[in-house]
Amino acid sequence: MLNRRNFLTAAVGVAAAGGLAACAKEDKASTGTSGGGGSKTITLGFSQVGSESGWRSANTDSVKSAAKEAGYNLKFSDAQQKQENQISAIRSYIAQKVDVIAFSPVVVTGWDAVLKEAKAKNIPVVLTDRSVETSDQSLYVTLVGSDFTDEGRRAAKILEKVLEKAGHKGAVKIAQLEGTTGAAPAIERAKGFKEVMDASHKDDWKIVVSQTGDFTRAGGKQVMAAFLQSNPDINVLFAHNDDMAIGAIQSIEAAGKKPGKDILIVSIDGVKDGFVAMSEGKINAIVECNPLLGPQLMDVVKKVKNGEPVERWIKTKEGDFMQDQAKAALPSRKY
């Protein structure tokens, strides 16, 4: 578990070298000038989960643009949602002796060996977006990202408002579209939602079906179609991200039902396409998960490289949106 107030000073890495050979797709940003008054340019090795959603694409763009703005030499790798690709990329960064390694882990477990290799070479590691479970908390410096458990709680709380606004009476039969199996947001969003449900709605709320849609629109569409065949009386959908919700909407409409009315929908992320669907009345509420972590990450990388202390968990600022707020908020959405 993360200790939010535990401070840790990171070790300083050494300068970058060489090319990257890994199973993941990789591209290299051009080396910028250091803003450190003649100090050496920071080289950051970053391994991204993939490009499975609009949120992830926005997150990648934020990291790349922020690294360019900071004048860092960014070595970027797309793991294509495969843990083995991320491990290969991280080992390549270690071999190249980058200054700092950052990555958004595909799943929670299975990182100890490669993180120990980074620690042995005195290369500090920063987690972004997602947490990991490790036997040694010193294997990474900090996490820059959201509180997924709280996002699940917020989703349950906003569903209360959605049900009240819709004038819903009687049993609440919930279908849950889970994120990638084993991924921190999937585990923690489900946990937070269930906490509120068990505490306040034991008698009237029930998750009747739950399955992973792998955070993709195609997955959401396919799984929701199966949900509707096995449980045609579903009246609420809780989707772990907007892309799955958007995919599910297609299956709901194909089944002759009205999303946002016959089936009330709450999702998490807050991507622009999600707001479009909400403005059209097809999603009832969205819990925001901010992907624009790049500037925060670059600030943390600089501090870590300089041996400065950082908080164990650096949280992002987020909000919640009901359907009647969508049209006004849509023009200002940055992702």
Image (cartoon, rainbow, N blue to C red):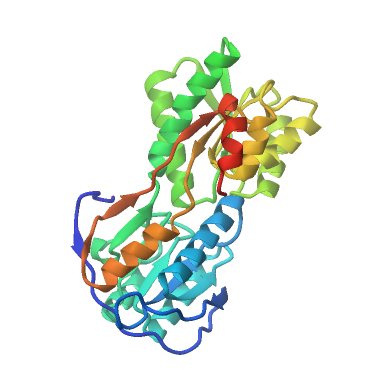
Which residue is nearer to you in this view: 331 or 139? 331
Give the quarter of the image for residue 178: top right
Give the quarter of the image for residue 163: top right
- In the figure, 23 relative to 52: above or below? below
Identify the residue at image location x=37%, y=78%: 34
- In the figure, 158 relative to 267: above or below? above
Identify the residue at image location x=41%, y=69%: 70
Q: Is 190 on the left or on the right of 233, as rendered?
A: left
Give the quarter of the image for residue 33: bottom left
Which residue is nearer to you in this view: 60 or 133? 60
Q: Is 38 on the left or on the right of 216, as rendered?
A: left
Q: Report the number of discs.
A: 0
Residue most extreme to the front: 37
Which x, y percent locates residue 35?
Answer: 35, 74
Identify the residue at image location x=28%, y=63%: 141
Residue most extreme to the bottom: 18
Which x, y percent locates residue 98?
Answer: 38, 80
In this orientation, does residue 134 appear?
Answer: no
Which x, y percent locates residue 252?
Answer: 73, 31
Identify the residue at image location x=57%, y=10%: 169
In this orientation, does residue 213 appear?
Answer: yes
Which x, y percent locates residue 168?
Answer: 58, 13
Q: Is 38 on the left or on the right of 29, as rendered?
A: left
